[in-house]
């Protein structure tokens, strides 16, 4: 699996537009084959800072995502709204564990 | 590196208390040795849903974090504020790439 954290700093005057563009992108991406999750969140400590958290089955799904028309539209819409460069990391996962309230960290299949 | 995504659903009446408890936990955790990042974010699409995004050097740092007094205090404070069970995943990273605007995906050391 690949986990993506995409951090962005939005110019304050673009907050509403960012929210519309970002949530549309989330919805479109979640419909893609190989997408396990795609959501956007606002930082509670820093105004106008956001993170996209995405989960993809594998690199093939991710590359397909890059080729989708809605991804190109999103990138074009997003960039003018930002106050600085985005920081987007793609982590390839070797194993995952889940916190179980009774058993502690347990492996995830 | 280990990347943690901790998703929680907070009862609406506990929003303010959650924000105080969660941001205090972020600040304390970021001061820990081996913590590369620890932030909390609010879902833009779903009210009262939040995600903690954490980055730890390795399992040793994570285990030390579990043993910190502020972690125990946080867990005790957090649980009564939730509307359902938390979903906390610990991903062990085998490699990471960064999106470079000009070069595409490039390896991160």
Image (cartoon, coloured by chain):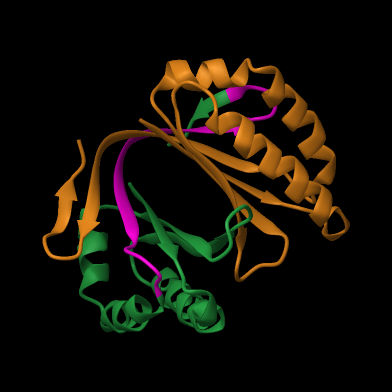
Chain colours: A orange, B green
Q: From the top left corner, tell me how far across and down residue B16 is, in percent.
A: 56, 82
Residue B99 counted in the magenta span:
yes
Asked whether the viewer can see residue A5, the reply is: no
- The percent position of residue B38, horizontal first and vertical second, equals 45, 63
Q: Quadrant of residue A68?
A: top right
Above or below — where is B59 with respect to A36? below
Could you say which is closer to the camera, residue B79 or residue B107? B79
Does B92 appear in magenta? yes
Seen at 57% across and 56% down, the residue is B46
Query: Is residue A50 left or right of B62 when viewed as pictured?
Result: right
Within the image, what quadrant is residue B98 found in? top right
- Left or right: residue B21 versus residue A42 is left
Position of residue A34 relative to residue A93, above or below, is: above
Going 19% across and 65% down the picture, which residue do you hit?
A: A101
Left or right of B27 on screen, residue B90: left
Where residue A69 sits in the image (x, y, percent)? 70, 18
Q: Residue B91, position in %: x, y?
A: 31, 44
Residue A80 visible in the current orientation: yes
Q: Main secondary structure of the magenta part?
A: strand
Does A68 appear above or below B91?
above
> In the current view of this chain or complex, which residue is farthest to the right?
A13
Count every numbered label the image shows and give the total: 0
The residue at the far left in this view is A103
Q: Residue at x 83, y 48 (%)?
A: A17
Locate the C terminus of chain B and report the quarter of the image it occupies.
Answer: top left
> Looking at the image, which residue is at 85% across and 40% down?
A80
Extent of the magenta region: B82-104
């Amino acid at each position: 699996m690949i986990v993506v954290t995409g951090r962005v700093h939005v110019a304050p005057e673009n907050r509403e537009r960012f929210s519309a563009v970002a949530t549309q992108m989330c919805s479109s991406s979640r419909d893609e084959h190989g997408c396990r999750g795609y959501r956007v969140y606002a930082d509670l400590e820093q105004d106008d800072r956001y993170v996209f958290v995405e989960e993809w089955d594998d690199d093939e799904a991710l590359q397909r995502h890059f080729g989708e028309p809605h991804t190109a539209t999103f990138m074009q819409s997003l960039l003018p709204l930002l106050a600085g460069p985005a920081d987007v990391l793609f982590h390839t996962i070797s194993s995952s564990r889940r916190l179980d309230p009774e058993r502690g960290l347990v492996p995830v299949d």
